[in-house]
Protein backbone atom coordinates (compact mmCIF):
# COMPACT_ATOMS: atom_id res chain seq x y z
CA UNK A 1 0.00 0.00 0.00
CA UNK A 2 1.44 3.34 -1.08
CA UNK A 3 0.63 5.80 1.70
CA UNK A 4 2.37 8.86 0.27
CA UNK A 5 0.12 11.43 -1.44
CA UNK A 6 1.18 14.58 -3.21
CA UNK A 7 -0.37 17.22 -0.98
CA UNK A 8 -3.17 18.14 1.38
CA UNK A 9 -5.77 18.53 -1.36
CA UNK A 10 -5.11 14.96 -2.50
CA UNK A 11 -5.17 13.66 1.07
CA UNK A 12 -8.59 15.10 1.98
CA UNK A 13 -10.37 14.92 -1.37
CA UNK A 14 -12.80 12.16 -0.31
CA UNK A 15 -13.89 13.86 2.94
CA UNK A 16 -17.59 14.41 2.29
CA UNK A 17 -20.30 16.64 3.71
CA UNK A 18 -21.59 15.50 7.10
CA UNK A 19 -18.55 13.47 8.12
CA UNK A 20 -16.95 13.34 11.59
CA UNK A 21 -13.34 14.53 11.79
CA UNK A 22 -10.72 14.41 14.52
CA UNK A 23 -8.16 17.19 14.26
CA UNK A 24 -4.99 17.06 16.33
CA UNK A 25 -3.48 20.03 18.07
CA UNK A 26 -3.67 22.08 21.22
CA UNK A 27 -4.55 25.68 20.60
CA UNK A 28 -2.46 26.47 17.53
CA UNK A 29 0.30 24.02 18.48
CA UNK A 30 0.59 20.90 16.35
CA UNK A 31 -2.47 21.57 14.21
CA UNK A 32 -2.74 20.15 10.66
CA UNK A 33 -2.52 23.56 8.98
CA UNK A 34 -2.28 22.31 5.41
CA UNK A 35 -5.27 19.97 5.69
CA UNK A 36 -7.43 22.66 7.30
CA UNK A 37 -6.62 25.03 4.44
CA UNK A 38 -7.42 22.30 1.93
CA UNK A 39 -10.77 21.62 3.62
CA UNK A 40 -11.61 25.33 3.45
CA UNK A 41 -10.73 25.39 -0.24
CA UNK A 42 -12.71 22.22 -0.90
CA UNK A 43 -15.75 23.68 0.85
CA UNK A 44 -16.91 20.52 2.63
CA UNK A 45 -19.93 21.33 4.81
CA UNK A 46 -21.85 20.12 7.89
CA UNK A 47 -18.78 18.65 9.54
CA UNK A 48 -18.54 17.45 13.12
CA UNK A 49 -15.08 18.35 14.39
CA UNK A 50 -13.49 16.70 17.43
CA UNK A 51 -10.58 18.82 18.62
CA UNK A 52 -9.30 20.25 21.89
CA UNK A 53 -10.43 23.69 20.74
CA UNK A 54 -11.51 25.67 17.72
CA UNK A 55 -8.37 27.68 17.05
CA UNK A 56 -8.66 31.46 16.72
CA UNK A 57 -10.79 33.58 14.41
CA UNK A 58 -8.40 33.71 11.48
CA UNK A 59 -6.38 30.53 11.87
CA UNK A 60 -6.77 26.82 12.51
CA UNK A 61 -10.32 25.45 12.75
CA UNK A 62 -11.41 29.07 13.09
CA UNK A 63 -11.06 29.31 9.30
CA UNK A 64 -13.59 26.51 8.89
CA UNK A 65 -15.97 28.26 11.27
CA UNK A 66 -15.68 31.47 9.27
CA UNK A 67 -16.72 29.63 6.11
CA UNK A 68 -19.64 27.93 7.94
CA UNK A 69 -18.31 24.41 7.33
CA UNK A 70 -18.67 23.12 10.91
CA UNK A 71 -22.04 21.89 12.14
CA UNK A 72 -20.86 20.66 15.55
CA UNK A 73 -17.74 21.11 17.67
CA UNK A 74 -16.73 18.58 20.32
CA UNK A 75 -14.08 20.33 22.40
CA UNK A 76 -12.78 20.99 25.88
CA UNK A 77 -11.84 24.69 25.52
CA UNK A 78 -13.12 27.34 23.16
CA UNK A 79 -12.19 30.65 24.76
CA UNK A 80 -10.00 32.19 22.06
CA UNK A 81 -12.50 32.36 19.20
CA UNK A 82 -15.02 35.21 18.94
CA UNK A 83 -16.70 33.74 15.85
CA UNK A 84 -17.17 30.45 17.70
CA UNK A 85 -18.86 32.36 20.52
CA UNK A 86 -21.11 34.23 18.09
CA UNK A 87 -22.23 31.04 16.32
CA UNK A 88 -22.83 29.26 19.62
CA UNK A 89 -24.96 32.07 21.09
CA UNK A 90 -26.92 32.49 17.86
CA UNK A 91 -27.70 28.76 17.64
CA UNK A 92 -25.79 28.30 14.38
CA UNK A 93 -23.28 25.89 15.92
CA UNK A 94 -23.92 22.81 18.04
CA UNK A 95 -21.32 22.43 20.79
CA UNK A 96 -20.44 19.57 23.13
CA UNK A 97 -18.01 20.68 25.83
CA UNK A 98 -16.33 17.82 27.69
CA UNK A 99 -13.48 17.59 30.23
CA UNK A 100 -10.08 17.52 28.58
CA UNK A 101 -9.09 14.18 30.09
CA UNK A 102 -12.35 12.65 28.90
CA UNK A 103 -11.68 13.95 25.40
CA UNK A 104 -8.27 12.31 25.40
CA UNK A 105 -9.52 9.03 26.85
CA UNK A 106 -12.42 8.76 24.41
CA UNK A 107 -9.86 9.09 21.61
CA UNK A 108 -7.67 6.46 23.24
CA UNK A 109 -10.62 4.09 23.70
CA UNK A 110 -11.45 4.34 19.99
CA UNK A 111 -7.84 3.54 19.11
CA UNK A 112 -7.80 0.54 21.45
CA UNK A 113 -11.08 -0.82 20.10
CA UNK A 114 -12.93 -0.23 23.38
CA UNK A 115 -16.60 0.82 23.00
CA UNK A 116 -16.76 2.96 26.13
CA UNK A 117 -15.07 4.08 29.33
CA UNK A 118 -16.16 4.90 32.87
CA UNK A 119 -14.77 8.12 34.34
CA UNK A 120 -15.42 10.13 37.52
CA UNK A 121 -14.98 13.39 35.59
CA UNK A 122 -18.29 15.19 35.17
CA UNK A 123 -20.31 13.25 37.73
CA UNK A 124 -22.77 15.61 39.42
CA UNK A 125 -22.48 18.28 36.71
CA UNK A 126 -24.27 19.18 33.48
CA UNK A 127 -21.81 16.89 31.69
CA UNK A 128 -23.58 13.89 33.23
CA UNK A 129 -27.11 14.82 32.15
CA UNK A 130 -28.79 11.92 30.35
CA UNK A 131 -25.83 9.59 30.75
CA UNK A 132 -25.47 6.31 32.61
CA UNK A 133 -23.79 6.46 36.01
CA UNK A 134 -22.47 3.30 37.68
CA UNK A 135 -21.02 2.83 41.13
CA UNK A 136 -17.73 0.99 41.58
CA UNK A 137 -16.42 0.41 45.11
CA UNK A 138 -18.57 3.18 46.51
CA UNK A 139 -17.70 5.83 43.89
CA UNK A 140 -19.84 7.01 40.97
CA UNK A 141 -18.50 6.89 37.43
CA UNK A 142 -19.92 8.29 34.21
CA UNK A 143 -20.26 6.19 31.05
CA UNK A 144 -18.69 7.88 28.04
CA UNK A 145 -18.58 6.30 24.58
CA UNK A 146 -15.49 6.05 22.41
CA UNK A 147 -15.45 8.47 19.49
CA UNK A 148 -16.50 7.24 16.07
CA UNK A 149 -14.66 9.40 13.55
CA UNK A 150 -14.55 8.95 9.79
CA UNK A 151 -11.14 10.64 9.53
CA UNK A 152 -8.36 11.57 11.93
CA UNK A 153 -6.15 14.40 10.66
CA UNK A 154 -2.86 14.88 12.49
CA UNK A 155 0.37 16.82 12.16
CA UNK A 156 3.80 15.41 12.98
CA UNK A 157 7.33 16.75 12.93
CA UNK A 158 8.81 13.86 10.97
CA UNK A 159 7.44 10.79 9.23
CA UNK A 160 8.50 8.08 6.81
CA UNK A 161 6.90 6.63 3.72
CA UNK A 162 5.41 3.77 5.76
CA UNK A 163 3.53 6.26 7.93
CA UNK A 164 5.65 6.04 11.09
CA UNK A 165 5.47 9.36 12.93
CA UNK A 166 7.57 11.36 15.37
CA UNK A 167 6.06 14.37 17.14
CA UNK A 168 8.08 17.22 18.59
CA UNK A 169 7.71 18.47 22.15
CA UNK A 170 4.35 20.09 22.99
CA UNK A 171 3.11 19.62 19.41
CA UNK A 172 2.67 15.96 20.28
CA UNK A 173 -0.47 16.71 22.42
CA UNK A 174 -3.61 14.97 21.06
CA UNK A 175 -2.02 13.86 17.79
CA UNK A 176 -0.84 10.31 18.69
CA UNK A 177 -4.12 9.19 20.24
CA UNK A 178 -6.17 10.68 17.43
CA UNK A 179 -3.94 9.00 14.87
CA UNK A 180 -4.95 5.66 16.41
CA UNK A 181 -8.66 6.45 16.46
CA UNK A 182 -9.83 7.41 12.96
CA UNK A 183 -11.18 4.97 10.41
CA UNK A 184 -8.79 6.71 8.01
CA UNK A 185 -5.82 8.66 9.37
CA UNK A 186 -4.14 11.42 7.40
CA UNK A 187 -0.76 12.70 8.58
CA UNK A 188 0.98 15.83 7.38
CA UNK A 189 4.64 16.12 8.33
CA UNK A 190 7.34 18.76 8.21
CA UNK A 191 9.92 16.25 7.04
CA UNK A 192 9.21 13.06 5.06
CA UNK A 193 11.98 10.47 4.84
CA UNK A 194 12.30 7.01 3.26
CA UNK A 195 11.23 4.02 5.34
CA UNK A 196 14.02 2.77 7.59
CA UNK A 197 15.56 6.16 8.34
CA UNK A 198 13.70 6.79 11.60
CA UNK A 199 15.05 5.34 14.85
CA UNK A 200 12.41 2.78 15.90
CA UNK A 201 12.94 3.78 19.54
CA UNK A 202 11.87 7.36 18.75
CA UNK A 203 8.65 6.57 16.86
CA UNK A 204 5.52 7.75 18.66
CA UNK A 205 2.89 6.45 16.20
CA UNK A 206 3.53 3.23 14.26
CA UNK A 207 2.71 3.37 10.56
CA UNK A 208 0.01 0.71 10.91
CA UNK A 209 -2.34 3.46 12.09
CA UNK A 210 -1.60 5.88 9.23
CA UNK A 211 -3.28 5.55 5.84
CA UNK A 212 -2.04 8.69 4.04
CA UNK A 213 0.99 10.88 4.57
CA UNK A 214 2.44 13.91 2.83
CA UNK A 215 5.05 16.62 3.35
CA UNK A 216 3.41 19.86 4.37
CA UNK A 217 4.52 23.33 3.33
CA UNK A 218 4.50 26.92 4.63
CA UNK A 219 3.89 26.26 8.31
CA UNK A 220 3.18 29.46 10.23
CA UNK A 221 3.33 27.95 13.74
CA UNK A 222 1.53 30.88 15.29
CA UNK A 223 1.47 31.67 18.99
CA UNK A 224 -2.00 32.30 20.44
CA UNK A 225 -0.97 34.83 23.06
CA UNK A 226 2.47 36.36 22.81
CA UNK A 227 3.80 38.03 25.96
CA UNK A 228 7.02 40.04 25.69
CA UNK A 229 8.92 42.46 27.86
CA UNK A 230 8.24 46.16 27.35
Image (spheres, rainbow, N blue to C red):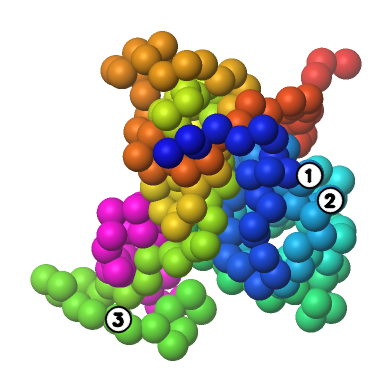
Q: Residues within 10 Å of mark 3 (few under 14, many from 20)?
A: some
Q: Can you give x and y, in whole percent of width and height, for residue 86 in the image?
A: 85, 68
State the residue in front, 132 or 149: 149
Answer with the quarter of the image where residue 73 lies. Answer: bottom right
Identify the residue at horizontal 63%, vertical 26% (top origin): 215
Residue 119 placement, left or right of 147 = left
Q: Secondary structure at mark 1?
A: helix
Indicate whether 80 appears above or below 20.
Answer: above
Identify the residue at horizontal 84%, vertical 51% (top origin): 41
Indicate whether 54 appears above or below 193.
Answer: below
Indicate whether 123 appears above or below 194.
Answer: below
Tally the marks: 3
Residue 153 placement, left or right of 36 = left
Q: Residue furthest left?
A: 137
Which residue is disc 3 drawn over? 133
Which residue is disc 2 drawn over? 41
Which is in the foreground here, disc 3 or disc 1? 1
Q: Earlier in the sequence, mark 3 or mark 1?
A: 1
Q: Secondary structure at mark 3?
A: strand
Pointer 2 and pointer 1: residues touching (CB < 8 Å)? yes
Label 2, label 1: how many angstroms apart (C-alpha)? 6 Å
Which residue is disc 1 drawn over? 37
Answer with the quarter of the image where residue 203 lies. Answer: top left
Answer with the quarter of the image where residue 155 lies. Answer: top right
Indicate whether 65 appears above or below 154.
Answer: below
Q: Can you give x and y, in whole percent of width and height, for residue 43 in the image?
A: 82, 60
Pointer 3 and pointer 1: residues touching (CB < 8 Å)? no
Q: Secondary structure at mark 2?
A: helix
Q: The magenta stretch spans which residues? A: 104-125
Amino acid sequence: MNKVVANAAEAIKDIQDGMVLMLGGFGLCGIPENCITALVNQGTKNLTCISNNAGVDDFGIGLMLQSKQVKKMISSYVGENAEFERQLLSGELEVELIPQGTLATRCMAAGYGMPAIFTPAGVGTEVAEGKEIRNFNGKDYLLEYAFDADFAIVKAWKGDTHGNLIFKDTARNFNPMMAMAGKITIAEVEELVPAGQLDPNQIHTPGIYVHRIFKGIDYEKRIEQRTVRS
